[in-house]
Amino acid sequence: MEPTTTTKTSILKNLTFQILIAMILGASLGIFIHTFYDADFAKAFSGYIKMLATVFIRLVQMIISPLVFTTLVVGIAKFGDIKSVGRIGGKAMGWFFTASFLSLLIGMFWVNILQPGTGLNLLNVDTAAAGDVTEKTHNFSAQNFVEHIIPKSIVEAMAFNEILQIVVFAIFFGLAAASIGDYAKPVINVLDKISHIVLKMVTYVMNFAPIGVFGAIAGVFAIRDLNELLMTYAKFFGSFLVGISSLWALLLFIGFVFLGNKMKNLLKHIFSPLIIAFGTTSSEAVFPKLTEELERFGIKNKIVSFMLPLGYSFNLDGSMMYMTFASIFIAQAYGVPLDLKTQMVMLLVLMLTSKGIAGVPRASLVVVAATCGMFNIPVEGIALILPIDHFCDMFRSATNVLGNALATSVVAKWEKEI
């Protein structure tokens, strides 16, 4: 039976469908440019076409700060007391650290089993390309870590989209508002209305998602020879896919254990955010959309607004798995022996140093480079994974979205707010 005109129209208007088409068209155009034009033209084309992705991501970043602040303050104020916030916060942090540990462990397990770095040819590696990443490790210290968490100005934190700093300020503001009671209600009502306006803006901004994904995919394929990359990095990328697939299997299993049949419904709601994160390599780009979809799934606003900002700072499962995998891969490539005890210490170091780096460009690589320096692994080894990192980042970003959606849903069920 032929689909009706109305059905065809609804399919064409479906955001997920549009994004999938954009990915195919972007990849096709990028491959065409790479195949039939010289490297200089392809590089210039990539720079221009990626502006489409930049426009989309900046539009999203434009609304993240007001959305995080207003929804989190309103959510905490609705809890009404510090005890409730502490209880949910405790459950959230317990989940985040457990998930992080398991993700790091999975990365460590597979890189030791599959040994993708052993026997790797280190000739013709462009170490200069790693300069911008290794530069950022110079400021990677305990003081810098604390400064990244505690804001000295909420205006500055909002200006630079420092999610964790905004979360810290919003928690204090929300708790203070809740303690005042009725006197603070007019302020909370205003912030509640602002949050709804910002969520309406999300609907408008998401219309640009297919265009952004198209630009991001076309730009990458225009300057990368995918066949050559996959042949060169077949063992690394294949091993990484085994690891990330294992992590997905674990997350989905845990989801079905805690949520039962609701897990299928959750996956339907977050499919569009997963595709956007995959195409743009930015889990931050779907923060507003994910907020909207989790509320549509049935989770109370106060839980979503509290859990997601925390999750984006403390619960990056895909990135965590990649950190141990990449660090030990570089050690294998350079023949640096790491016994089990040293690897477990590395895992604990990564567990701590990776927290609160949300919003830092190429955060995973910065942490990997810093960790390599701590364990006498050549930091320039980061250049080994740079050529293939974009494709790994696609999977990391999508996994981060799944992990945060699952964490929010499970805590909501524990709190009977779903």
Image: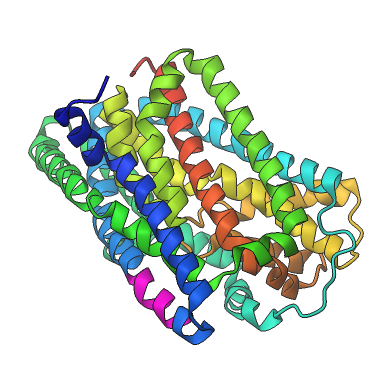
Quadrant of the snapshot with the N terminus: top left
Q: Nearer the viewer, residue 340 or 152?
A: 340
| Left or right: 95, with 60 as reference point | right
Report the residue at 11% width, 34% height from top: 185
Q: Position of residue 3 (x, y in %)?
A: 23, 25
Q: Is residue 276 above or below residue 14?
A: below
- Examine the structure image and report whether residue 411 is included in the region drawn in magenta: no
Q: Nearer the viewer, residue 54 or 189?
A: 54
Report the residue at 56% width, 66% height from top: 143
Q: Main secondary structure of the magenta part?
A: helix
Magenta stretch: give its range: 43-51
Q: How is the image coloured?
A: rainbow
Residue 349 visible from this viewpoint? no
In the picture as drawn, the residue positioned furthest to the front comes out as 1
Report the residue at 15% width, 31% height from top: 5
Q: Position of residue 385 (x, y in %)?
A: 68, 65
Quadrant of the snapshot with the C terminus: top left
Q: Position of residue 86 (x, y in %)?
A: 42, 30
Residue 379 visible from this viewpoint? yes
Q: Nearer the viewer, residue 94 or 229?
A: 229
Q: Is residue 392 above or below residue 268?
A: below
